[in-house]
Image: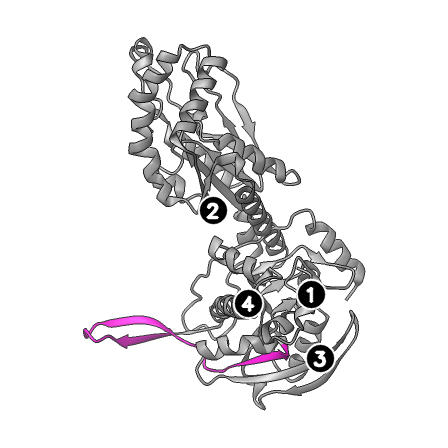
Amino acid sequence: MDSKDVVQLIEASSGVHFSGFHLNGLQPRNSDVEQPTTSTTECVQKQPFVIAGVAGGAASGKTTVCDMIIEQLHDQRVVLVNQDSFYHNLTEEELKRVHDYNFDHPDAFDTEKLLCSMENLKHGKAVDIPKYDFKSYKNNILQSRRVNPSDVIILEGILVFHDSRVREMMNMKIFVDTDADVRLARRIRRDTVEKGRDIGQVLDQYSKFVKPAFDDFILPTKKYADIIIPRGGDNHVAIDLIVQHIRTKLGQHDLCKIYPNLYVIQSTFQIRGMHTLIRDAKTTKHDFVFYADRLIRLVVEHGLGHLPFTEKQVTTPTGSVYTGVDFCKRLCGVSVIRSGESMENALRACCKGIKIGKILIHREGDNGQQLIYEKLPNDILDRHVLLLDPILGTGNSAVQAISLLIRKGVPESNIIFLNLISAPQGVHVVCKSFPRIKIVTSEIDIGLNEDYRVIPGMGEFGDRYFGTDDDDDQQVIQI
């Protein structure tokens, strides 16, 4: 392994710290030969990786939230698209009664044009976004804005969740929830000071159009949100969480583009919440084990989805025929002692009676690693192997374990390496050394510190899981 190559790969992907998701597709029937479930091309086509929708009532603080997210993602390619740019041009008849026109109704927007623009951006094409002129109520008076494809696209507007076709394009849906009195006060201040309107006109428009539209069309879309931000831009904790989530997804996606054999389970705020708990140095051993087990189970299930299968038909209790698949029978697990043993129960729960081998690798810093002990099934060369180790750091231990399995006759393509978190350095080392194995993980972290620990990481996993750390030591776990 040429260390210069690794350094170059790390530098190529260190600009972003994100995470990708993988969509499992069925392999051809009677597929006993491993075939890639995804490809580098498919990963690239998922650009932009994050499309975030930000909805909420007028003057709820949506723009402030978007600006704060963009500011914190300053090292990423981020573009903001406003739903306001896609208002319909008013007809001559509508212009005569413009004060009776409801700009908060779904029909006020050219949703088809919005969809077309978002589809083009999603598929890597630059688009011209119109600038709506609120003096002439036309979108062809001002020069349009050229928007190039980016890593992150934020679509902001009061009704961006209303149309299901627009919602389905989003990887993340955020609803800014601000008290109605606060929204009204902001609207009065904005319209009277910035637009020179009479306060009576503002209140009349609010009671006639704005409030009914919010109750009828905007508030009901709150149920579609993945995350709700009370108090808008004042809620720094929620915004930080969103930014971290986007960074994680982007960094993992960047590695996915390099290595088609890397799979990161699709991140949700539920998964993100469990990671938050097990990474917290103050989390009790009981809670650490509980949430670690839940995450391990998800990783194991995802890993099993990459095994070959054969088509199988069964008769249901109704007498009907169901065409499904039969699980891979020749399977075993191999855990890296000792932290890898924490993953054995989840594997046994998913695969009844599965054989599990052991590998003990002595670790002394980043170098001097040597195999101490191995106990593997005699027929392991005829099996698909799930290699278990919750942390992929430098990759040296993984390379040692995989090399042993290959020496035992296991085909490289028959090995699936399961772990909870990975460092980019370890991913580079393992994937470059063994391009045909699969790595399945739940998150990719920023990197390694000077002590070769994964950061932010979760400390010594085995000590925390099995409770072998002293209380004093637990207070200084690096996360």
Q: Reading the chain from its start, which is encountered first: label 4 or label 2?
A: 2
Task: Please say whether residue 451 is one of the residues in the magenta stretch.
Answer: no
Check disc 4 and report its element: helix, strand or loop. Answer: helix
Secondary structure character of the magenta stretch overall: strand
Q: Reading the chain from its start, which is encountered first: label 4 or label 1?
A: 4
**The one of 17 and 221 positioned closer to us in this rendering:** 221
Bounds of the magenta segment: 311-338
Type of amino acid under label 3: Ile
Q: Reading the chain from its start, which is encountered first: label 2 or label 3?
A: 2
Residue position marked by numbered label 3 in the rendering: 361
Type of amino acid under label 1: Gly
Residue position marked by numbered label 4 in the rendering: 288
Q: Is residue 64 visible?
A: yes
Type of amino acid under label 4: Phe
Looking at the image, the residue that sits furthest to the left is 318
Which residue is located at x 53 percent, y 48 percent? 45
Residue position marked by numbered label 1 in the rendering: 393
Answer few, some or many: residues within 10 Å of disc 3's Cα (few below 14, many 20 plus, some between 14 and 19).
some
Distance from the alpha carbon under mark 4 to that under mark 2: 28 Å
Q: Which circle, 4 or 1, is nearer the viewer? A: 4
Distance from the alpha carbon under mark 1 to that under mark 2: 28 Å
Check disc 2 and report its element: helix, strand or loop. Answer: loop
Check disc 3 and report its element: helix, strand or loop. Answer: strand
Distance from the alpha carbon under mark 2 to that under mark 3: 40 Å
Type of amino acid under label 2: Asn
Q: Reading the chain from its start, which is encountered first: label 3 or label 4?
A: 4
Q: Is residue 338 left or right of residue 343?
A: right
Residue position marked by numbered label 2 in the rendering: 171
Q: Reading the chain from its start, which is encountered first: label 1 or label 3?
A: 3
Answer few, some or many: residues within 10 Å of disc 1's Cα (few below 14, many 20 plus, some between 14 and 19).
many
Distance from the alpha carbon under mark 3 to that under mark 4: 25 Å
Distance from the alpha carbon under mark 1 to that under mark 3: 14 Å
